[in-house]
Image (tube, rainbow, N blue to C red):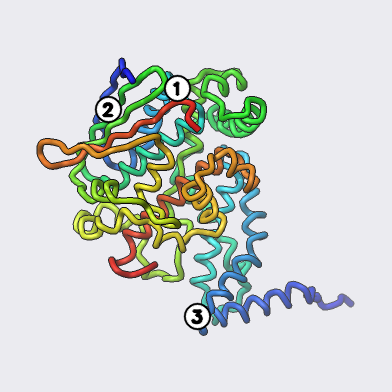
Amino acid sequence: MSAAPRRSPLPERAREEDRVLLRRYHQGGDTGAREQLIQRHLPLVRSLARRYAGRGEALEDIEQVGAIGLIKAIDRFELERDVSLATYATPNVVGEIKRHFRDKGWAIRVPRALQELNASMSGAIERLTGKLGRSPSIAEIADELKTSPEEVLEAMEVGSAYSTVSLSSGPGGEEELDPLETIGDEDVEFERSEHRAALEPALGRLAPREREILRMRFEEGLPQTQIAQRIGLSQMHVSRLIRKSLSVMREELLRVPPGMSP
Amino acid sequence: MGHQERIDLDAPLSGDFQAVVRLIIGGIAERVDFAFEEIDDLQLAVERLLAEAGQVGSVHLSFEVGESSIRTRVGPISERAIADALRDGEVQPGHLTLRRILQTVVDSFGVEESADGRVVVRLEKLKGVP
């Protein structure tokens, strides 16, 4: 006689808590519940992101892309579904990560040697910054990595390339315009040109860490090296986050009708 | 400061070519022995200006390379809002504007009018200025 399979009470409880939060968000518009759901499932995103590490892309970047998939899954979840959020979110997260790699085309376009050089550059820059007490030159980085300045520049560019997909996809659902769809619309751009100069209304669409990095860079005037130390990231990663954040904010301004705060 | 060498570039405004522009700026700045962070600053300044200039057509960029500086000109650009944004007075604390970004990442900048009423943005980046 075989015993009936028993479900562990812990996942069951977590699943029920998820459903309570999903109801609060979808039926009551409780964005705090949405934030809690994101936080609860970030370990899942990290776990899935790790599968795609070592392909020339910083793990933190992959995690951020995966988080977009998670947010979309939370926003699109239908309460009538008899499925856990984790089960529903997994293909969304993996799909978002795969799309990211496909969009960048690294697997086919960037030589492996360049991806590896990019991956080792971050450590070299940190070492040299510590040793020299300043940001190193390209020649110094090349010397440290025993390669040419041209290859370092190419590897830098590999690291700077990023997806323009918004980091802060909102809860607008299927009908929400993709930020990319608005780019290139001349009339819209012309009408909104006066708004372009002021990016700060879109700050709210960034994650707290990105907001803090922008504040340190553009308000405190701290160099990237110091920001990297404070936040605990590499200088290259800080650079990427600044670029990405500014692009996201600009896309957000083009997406939101003039006169409306995001 | 004397600028001996000059490089001119006409680049499409389409985002597809931003990486090419960044690579060229990196190559030029490396010749002046700019630090990694200084190169990144100059690339960011140009990238933000190009983003504001739109996505259609092309833009002219010129780089005057001195012993320890690079003077970059971006334009003529039809988008006069950029000029207005850069000419405004002091940026209020807590506000993140194009002017604030350029103030942070380059040593000086200015707006020049072209004969046809369009604008050229001039950026000056010096080596070794904290």
Tag 3–tag 2 contact (CB < 8 Å): no
Please give the name of the residue rendered at 50% of the width and 80% of the height, measured from the top-left corner.
Answer: A29
Mark 1 and mark 2 on one chain: yes
Residue A6 visible from this viewpoint: yes
Q: Residue furthest front?
A: B90
Task: Describe the element under mark 2 as helix, strand or loop.
Answer: strand
Instruction: Name which residue type carries label 2.
Output: Ser
Closer mark to the observer between disc 1 and disc 3: 1
Task: Describe the element under mark 1 as helix, strand or loop.
Answer: helix
- Picture coordinates of residue A156 (x, y %)? 50, 32
Return the chain for callout 1: B
Q: State the mark number for residue B30.
A: 1
Answer with left or right where residue A76 lies relative to residue A54. left
**Alpha carbon separation for disc pair 3 and 2:** 51 Å
- Picture coordinates of residue B127 (x, y %)? 45, 25
Return the chain for callout 2: B
The residue pinned by badge 3 equals A29
Q: Residues within 10 Å of mark 1 (few under 14, many from 20)?
A: many
Relative to the observer, which residue lies in front, B110 or A214?
A: B110
- Picture coordinates of residue A113 (x, y %)? 56, 27
Q: State the mark number for residue B62.
A: 2
Instruction: Name which residue type carries label 1.
Output: Glu
Please give the name of the residue rendered at 43% of the width and 20% of the height, measured from the top-left corner.
Answer: B32
Q: Residues within 10 Å of mark 3 (few under 14, many from 20)?
A: few
- Picture coordinates of residue B94 (x, y %)? 45, 57
**Alpha carbon separation for disc pair 1 and 3:** 52 Å
